[in-house]
């Protein structure tokens, strides 16, 4: 009985979050293209049957991208405060919600033998991907500051982020294969 209540509650919470999407402005994102491309990266790696740690890296990229996008939406709506602290807080919140969803979907748990250092492979990959994506985003911002607010090339942030994620995947593939 409690399992049915938990599933109903989970579906209700997810429905509320999905319905909130309709109230967001259409074109005030951190980089909706980045978010969509990261989600596609997760889909492609799953379709190719790659290791969960590698998929997790792209999940981490999606987490960071979504949190930074949400931070920009909230800032444009008038939410004040330390931008760095807001970004970190949103990344933690999106990360926890993502892991909770993975748990509800049965992607990991005590019976899962797919672990690295005792941590679920997809979770370790997501942690790594989140850190790398966040670092690439801030590296791109530092490049803009040095260059007086201008990018060095078109789609600089997206290219730096995906380049960093791909290098991260290659590192994981070599170390943990």
Image (spheres, grey):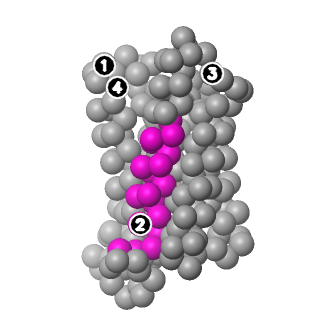
Residue 30 disc label: none
Percent of width and height locating residue 76? 45, 18
Range covered by the magenta-colored residues: 119-137
Q: Is residue 173 left or right of residue 142?
A: right
Q: Is residue 99 above or below residue 153?
A: below
Frontmost residue, 9 versus 132: 132
Q: Are marks 2 and 4 in contact (CB under 8 Å)?
A: no
In terms of sequence position, does the residue under pointer 2 or pointer 3 come before the other?
2
Please name the residue shown 47% across and 25% down the image. Answer: 142
Residue position marked by numbered label 4 in the rendering: 83
Residue 151 disc label: 3
Please name the residue shown 68% across and 54% down the image. Answer: 40
Percent of width and height locating residue 121? 45, 73
Please name the residue shown 55% across and 35% down the image. Answer: 22
Percent of width and height locating residue 58? 56, 57
Residue position marked by numbered label 1 in the rendering: 80
Residue position marked by numbered label 2 in the rendering: 124
- What element does badge 4 sit on? helix
In terms of sequence position, does the residue under pointer 2 or pointer 4 come before the other?
4
Q: Is residue 14 above or below residue 65?
A: below
- What element does badge 1 sit on? loop
Residue at mark 4 to residue at mark 3: CA–CA distance:
21 Å
Q: Is residue 43 left or right of residue 148?
A: right
Q: Is residue 174 left or right of residue 116?
A: right
Picture quarter with the C terminus: bottom right
Binning the other alpha carbons within 10 Å of mark 3 as few (below 14), some (14 to 19) or many (20 upward) gives some
């Amino acid at each position: 009985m409690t399992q049915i209540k938990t599933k109903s509650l989970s579906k209700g919470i997810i429905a509320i979050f999905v319905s909130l999407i309709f109230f967001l402005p259409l074109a005030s994102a951190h980089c909706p293209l980045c978010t969509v491309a990261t989600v596609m990266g997760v889909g492609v790696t799953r379709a190719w049957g790659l290791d969960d740690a590698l998929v997790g890296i792209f999940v981490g990229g999606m987490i960071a991208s979504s949190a930074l996008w949400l931070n920009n939406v909230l800032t444009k709506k008038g939410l004040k405060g330390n931008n760095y602290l807001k970004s970190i807080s949103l990344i933690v919140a999106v990360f926890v919600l993502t892991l909770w969803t993975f748990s509800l979907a049965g992607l990991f748990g005590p019976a899962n033998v797919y672990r690295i250092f005792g941590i679920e492979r997809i979770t370790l990959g997501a942690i790594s991907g989140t850190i790398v994506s966040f670092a690439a985003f801030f590296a791109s911002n530092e490049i803009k500051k040095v260059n007086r607010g201008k990018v060095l090339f078109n789609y600089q942030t997206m290219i730096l982020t995906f380049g960093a994620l791909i290098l991260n995947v290659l590192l994981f593939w070599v170390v943990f294969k």
